[in-house]
Image (spheres, rainbow, N blue to C red):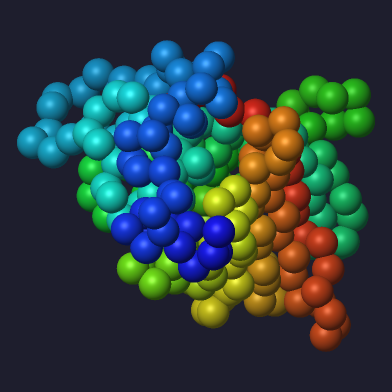
Amino acid sequence: MSERNASHPENDPNKLDGNEAVNRAAEDWKDAASRNIPAVGLDEVPVPDDTANLRQGPSLHDALLGLLPLVGVWQGEGQAHDSNGDQYTFGQQLVIAHDGEHYLTYTSRTWKIDSEGKPVGPDVRESGFWRISPKDEIEMTYTSNNGIVEIFYGEPFNERAWSLQSASTMVTETGPKNLGPGKRMYGLMPNNNLGWVDERMVDGEMRPYMSAELKRIAG
């Protein structure tokens, strides 16, 4: 199957349609299929609520089929490097949701974990959006609590992996001083966990910056 057809079933007669793709995802993640983002309980607004469960809420926009496996609530642990280059362990909850429109919402919260495996306080938060064009061109934008605004472009590597490269990395006056351009890869592992890796340019070469393996807990 051509990688360029990954998100457009009309280009490949052997590609699953939207309903079949949702059914397959529900089968792969049976344990999380009944769970979704917790309701906030505030006054209603006249637009659909975000959902991270393909079985609940509005239907996923047809143009997002190439990103469908990402939708869900994911949680796990990873490794990161601080401003001094020292490595530490972090926990992460990643929510990728939609409201029926042509974009995915992206929210990530991380917390530091000590050498005994205990959480010791909040770390980095990111919030942004994923979009994908009819030509399988992915746009991912996010802002972080530590003063970073970044734009990534990329494409599906295959039906279970997505490769992105930063096109614009802006840092505020109080943000990190030595954050270079980066690359990210998101992909489903053989155990259906979501793995992701962020590499950054340091002294002229790409080096590991953050990575994690997350289990789907809802969606």
Q: Residue at x 85, y 31 (%)?
A: 114
- Horizontal side of residue 68 vs 184, given as left or right: left
Along the line of sight, the residue nearer the viewer: 170 or 193? 193
Direction left: furthest residue: 46
In the image, residue 83 sits, relative to residue 101, either above or below, namely below
Q: Residue at x 51, y 72 (%)?
A: 153
In the image, residue 134 sits, relative to residue 196, either above or below, namely below
Which of the image's four quarters has the N terminus?
Answer: bottom right
Along the line of sight, the residue nearer the viewer: 175 or 21? 21
Along the line of sight, the residue nearer the viewer: 89 or 135? 135
Point out residue 49 in the picture as x, y percentages from the top left corner: 23, 33
Q: Residue at x 67, y 34 (%)?
A: 193
Q: Place residue 195 in its image quadrant.
A: top right
Point out residue 159 in the picture as x, y percentages from the top left corner: 55, 51
Q: Place residue 88 in its image quadrant.
A: top right
Q: Place residue 46 in its image quadrant.
A: top left
- Horizontal side of residue 131 vs 32, given as left or right: left
Point out residue 129 in the picture as x, y percentages from the top left corner: 40, 56
Which of the image's four quarters has the C terminus?
Answer: top left
Point out residue 180 in the picture as x, y percentages from the top left corner: 70, 76
| Residue 179 appears in view | no
- Horizontal side of residue 17 vs 119, given as left or right: left
In the image, residue 35 sits, relative to residue 168, either above or below, namely above
